[in-house]
Image (cartoon, grey):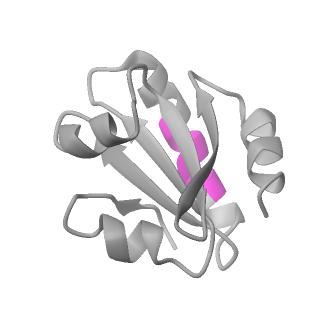
Amino acid sequence: MAEFKVTTANFEQEVLQSDKPVLVDFWAEWCGPCRMVGPIISELAKDYEGRLKVGKLNVDEQGELAAQFGIVSIPTMLLFKDGKAVSKTIGYQPKENLVAFIQNVL
């Protein structure tokens, strides 16, 4: 499954009520490091298909959700498990760092 777009309309259902852990990438179109990590996020969505859901949240379009989670720097990746944010990483990360970040929660 490819990554899905996270919005205020689907956040509760797709993230908080998910039966699988969810990685949410908080990003923006104008953010260089966000564009660098984007292809890695897509790879992770494929690599962890069936074990992890991967969502992308555009902070310019979903500012209320970004504010709710105290997002002040992007890219920020939050891992949700059982309806709670359990882990966070900020800034560009190479794939191996993100894999370790995810493995800590799976």
**Residue 1 in magenta?**
no
Please report the residue visible at 32 percent of the width from the left and 64 percent of the height from the top: 11
Q: How many numbered tags mark residues here?
A: 0
Q: Residue at x 55, y 45 (%)?
A: 78
Examine the structure image and report whether residue 41 is included in the region drawn in magenta: yes
Residue that appears at 52% across and 67% down: 83
Res. 67 image quadrant? top left
Q: Nearer the viewer, residue 92 or 68?
A: 68
| Lateral position of residue 47 relative to residue 39, left or right | right
Measured from the top left, where is residue 22 in percent x and y?
Answer: 56, 62
Q: Position of residue 98 (x, y in %)?
A: 72, 40
Quarter occupied by the C terminus: bottom right
Q: Main secondary structure of the magenta part?
A: helix
Residue at position x 43%, y 24% in the image: 74
Between 33 and 39, the one nearer to me in the picture: 33
Which segment did they paint magenta?
38-44
Q: Quadrant of residue 96?
A: top right
Q: Is residue 106 left or right of residue 59?
A: right
Indicate left or right for 52 with 26 as reference: right
Q: Is residue 31 left or right of residue 21?
A: left
Vertical placement of residue 15 versus 99, above or below: below
Residue 51 to residue 5: above or below: below
| As drawn, 30 above or below 50 | above
Where residue 70 appears, as percent x and y from the top left, is 39, 31
Query: Residue 31 placed where, x, y %?
Result: 35, 20
